[in-house]
Amino acid sequence: DSGVTQTPKHLITATGQRVTLRCSPRSGDLSVYWYQQSLDQGLQFLIQYYNGEERAKGNILERFSAQQFPDLHSELNLSSLELGDSALYFCASSRGSYNEQFFGPGTRLTVL
Amino acid sequence: AQTVTQSQPEMSVQEAETVTLSCTYDTSESDYYLFWYKQPPSRQMILVIRQEAYKQQNATENRFSVNFQKAAKSFSLKISDSQLGDAAMYFCAYGQETSGSRLTFGEGTQLTVNP
């Protein structure tokens, strides 16, 4: 158990819908990262937050957004879902920079 | 942009034997860090080992060790005394402070351990 929690574990929804994925980092970790793992794109970095502020952005679609709240948990919002958004979405956390990232169990999103 | 390449999509090893997984990366930075992550069938991403680029000594964690060749931009993982529980997808990952510590992953190597 990495100490990072993600909910829900599985999510099945339809095209055009909007979903919210939630992540709670390990106690004391200030950084939260979101990654997408799909069959054709592999593991890709989406976005990072550090102590409530956006720190870095990857190839995150405009339909996707995220935030980190004062209690340091984070949410990833995916809207206007398409079939190609089906993937495993991971949240990871770390103490700060140059620290190893610990991954949550992931949320499996299926868009039908 | 930094890239990470794992040229072995699949590898297999006999239980109790040693196997080496390869990883190369491309970067113009001098200060960065490298990781190996393991992803078993449960899909959980598990950190195996970490190496800072400024350290010349190769990292070791029990049966896992790395061969870090900075000039060659190579970072291989050696698993000694392989166990059935080592069977998993292994990902090499690169990170650096100037990119916000995001990790860039390789394509992965699927390791099979034969009894």
Image (cartoon, coloured by chain):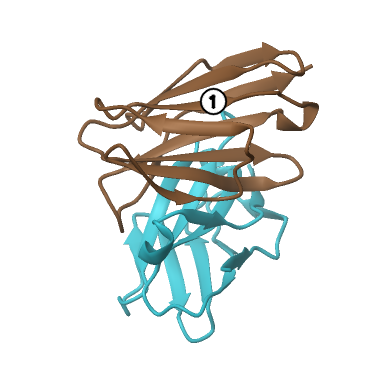
Task: Judge whether residue B22 can be spotted in this image.
Answer: no
Instruction: Identify whether B87 is placed above or below A104.
Output: below
Residue B43 location, quadrant: top right
| Horizontal arrangement in the rendering, residue B105 relative to residue B47 (left or right) | right
Residue A3 location, quadrant: top left
| Horizontal arrangement in the rendering, residue B49 relative to residue A44 (left or right) | left
The residue type indicated by label 1 comes to Asn
Q: The numbered mark 1 sits on a residue in which chain?
A: A
Image quadrant containing the N terminus of chain B: bottom right
Residue lying farthest front? A62
Counting from the top left corner in percent of width and height, residue A66 is at 47, 32
Between B70 and B38, the residue placed more toward the observer is B70
Q: Disc 1 on helix, strand or loop?
A: strand
User: Chain A hue?
Assistant: brown
Q: Which chain is cyan?
A: B
Residue lying farthest bottom? B71
| Horizontal arrangement in the rendering, residue B11 relative to residue B27 (left or right) | right
Instruction: Identify whether B54 is placed above or below B13.
Output: below
Residue, disc 1: A77
Task: Judge whether residue B90 can be spotted in this image.
Answer: yes
Residue lying farthest left? A28
How packed mark 1 is, by other alpha carbons closer than 10 Å (few <14, some 14-19, many 20 or more), is some
The residue depicted at 67 percent of the width and 46 percent of the height is A42
Counting from the top left corner in percent of width and height, residue A24 is at 35, 25
Instruction: Identify whether A103 is placed above or below B14.
Output: above
Instruction: Identify whether B35 is placed above or below A87.
Output: below
The residue depicted at 44 percent of the width and 77 percent of the height is B29
Between B51 and A40, the residue placed more toward the observer is A40
Counting from the top left corner in percent of width and height, residue B2 is at 56, 68
